[in-house]
Image (tube, rainbow, N blue to C red):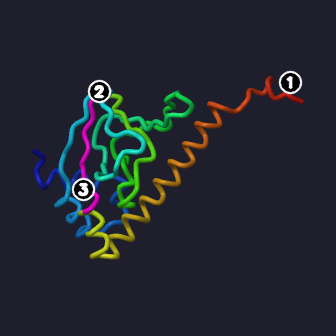
Amino acid sequence: MTSVETLMAILSRYPFAEELRPSDIEKLRSMAYEVPFSKNEIIFHEGDECRVFYLLTSGKVILEIVVGGCTLGIETLGAGDELGWSSMLESDRRYFQARAVERSYALAFEAAELNRACKADTAFGYGLLHHLLGVVARRLQATQMRLVDAYAPTAEQAQLAL
């Protein structure tokens, strides 16, 4: 089990906490618990219910989508990256599949508890959700770029089409 001091240091080290006050980091620390993921473990599937939000502390996790029967890697996440932002929407489902590329660890937060804390302390909620909105935007851009790479015609094919 990770000590209180270690959890505080972990949370303070990542961009996830840059806009948060020390009291906010303490609040997060009180909700966090550590979880391991084995190599190739599916952490969640696209469409699964969202109940847990994660902050990766070590290892690598790949976000994937299934398109036309093929699994496409969208983005590889590492220490300090957030996983499961959709849990903050409370009644939504996962938008990606997440799979551990190697042995990985994360701090986990129950979404219901995190949402209650955001509603009870709007400054905390704003800081956290503002940061997560940036994560959503980056994931959208990564998804667009990966789909363009996978499905856009090559220059030669485009010339033949003219």
User: Is residue 7 rendered to the left or right of residue 144?
Assistant: left
Tell me the amino acid under the disc marked 3. Glu
Q: Which residue is mark 1?
A: 160
Q: Check if mark 3's residue and mark 1's residue have beta carbons within 8 Å.
A: no
Position in image of residue 102 (x %, y %): 31, 28
Q: Check if mark 1's residue and mark 2's residue have beta carbons within 8 Å.
A: no
Q: Which residue is mark 2?
A: 39
Question: Within the image, what quadrant is residue 57 found in?
Answer: top left
Q: Which residue is mark 3?
A: 110
120 lies above or below 155: below
Position in image of residue 76 (x %, y %): 43, 36
Disc on res. 20: none
| Camera-nearest residue between 43 and 16 | 43
107 lies above or below 43: below
Q: Residues within 10 Å of mark 2 (few under 14, many from 20)?
A: some
Position in image of residue 84 (x %, y %): 36, 49
User: Is residue 139 rendered to the left or right of residue 148?
Assistant: left
Highlighted range, magenta: 103-112
Tell me the amino acid under the disc marked 2. Lys
Q: Residue at x 29, y 76 (%)?
A: 121
Separation (CA) of disc 1 from disc 2:
43 Å
Secondary structure beneath label 2? loop
What is the quadrant of the C terminus in the image? top right
Q: Residues within 10 Å of mark 3 (few under 14, many from 20)?
A: some
